[in-house]
Image (spheres, grey):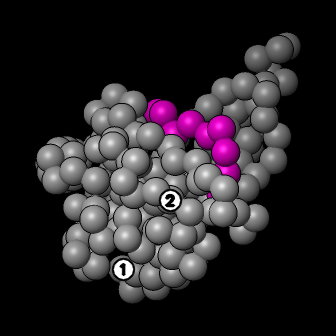
């Protein structure tokens, strides 16, 4: 009986997740690039030092909208672009699943900044990259005044996660699987 009562919400979640992914798979390169441009503009406008950080970086992987939904079991999915030298060099998706107390849905922007060329090279050479397994990512919290001190960032990969209300805190990206999109 417990399995039966759990099956229906799980099937609904799977259906919703498949709807997210099928809509996202239809996104064109141009649409992903437009969304990526907008996300980077917001990032630079809202976070002091963001432009200097991006200028120092080997590359930035931008997911303009990662949608998450869950009813006991959750999933998230988003598509984005890898920018090197300000140019898109590849398109990627991120996906993860979770189990635990959760109810609802949200969308957020994720920007992974590769501060070291070796970290970017390892990421680009992979065929499916999992945060926390294939590479460690430090989620950055912004200090007073909403600025990033680029001199104190000493991790090979740092992440910024924000939504329409600002930066999100106490968030883990561990277990997120990132894969290259083949258009």
* Residue 138 at x, y percent in the picture: 44, 40
User: Quick check: can you spot residue 147?
Assistant: yes
In terms of depth relative to the viewer, which is nearer, 56 or 167? 56
Residue at figure coordinates x 21%, y 50% from the top left: 116
* Residue 43 at x, y percent in the picture: 54, 71
Quadrant placement of the N terminus: top right
**Crowd band around label 1 with a 10 angstrom C-alpha radius: few (<14), some (14–19), many (20+):** some
Give residue 66's quadrant in the image: bottom right
Give whichever of discs 2 and 1 has the lower sequence position. 1
**Crowd band around label 2 with a 10 angstrom C-alpha radius: few (<14), some (14–19), many (20+):** many
Residue at figure coordinates x 29%, y 44% from the top left: 156
Quadrant placement of the C terminus: bottom left
* Residue 124 at x, y percent in the picture: 19, 53
What are the residue bounds of the magenta stretch? 167-175
In terms of depth relative to the viewer, which is nearer, 20 or 167? 167
- When the figure is inspected, residue 38 is found, relative to residue 178, above or below; the finding is below
- When the figure is inspected, residue 109 is found, relative to residue 76, above or below; the finding is below
- In the displayed structure, does residue 91 sit left or right of residue 116? right
Residue at figure coordinates x 40%, y 81% from the top left: 33
Question: What is the secondary structure assignment of the residue under circle 1?
Answer: helix
The residue pinned by badge 1 equals: 29
The residue pinned by badge 2 equals: 148
- When the figure is inspected, residue 81 is found, relative to residue 1, above or below; the finding is below
- Is residue 88 in the magenta section? no
Figure label count? 2
- Is residue 172 in the magenta section? yes
């Amino acid at each position: 009986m417990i399995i039966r009562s759990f099956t229906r919400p799980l099937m609904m979640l799977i259906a919703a997740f498949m709807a997210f992914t099928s809509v996202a798979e239809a996104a064109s390169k141009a649409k992903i690039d437009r969304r990526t441009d907008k996300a980077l503009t917001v990032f630079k406008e809202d976070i002091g030092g963001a432009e200097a950080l991006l200028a120092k970086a080997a590359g930035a992987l931008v997911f303009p909208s990662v949608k998450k939904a869950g009813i006991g079991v959750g999933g998230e999915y988003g598509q984005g672009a890898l920018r090197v030298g300000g140019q898109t060099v590849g398109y990627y998706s991120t996906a993860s699943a979770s189990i635990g107390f959760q109810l609802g849905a949200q969308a957020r922007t994720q920007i992974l900044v590769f501060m070291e060329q070796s970290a970017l090279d390892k990421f680009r050479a992979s065929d499916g990259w999992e945060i926390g397994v294939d590479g460690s990512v430090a989620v950055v919290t912004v200090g007073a005044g909403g600025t990033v001190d680029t001199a104190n960032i000493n991790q090979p990969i740092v992440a910024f996660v924000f939504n329409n209300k600002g930066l999100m805190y106490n968030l883990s990206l561990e277990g997120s699987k990132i894969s290259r999109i083949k258009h």
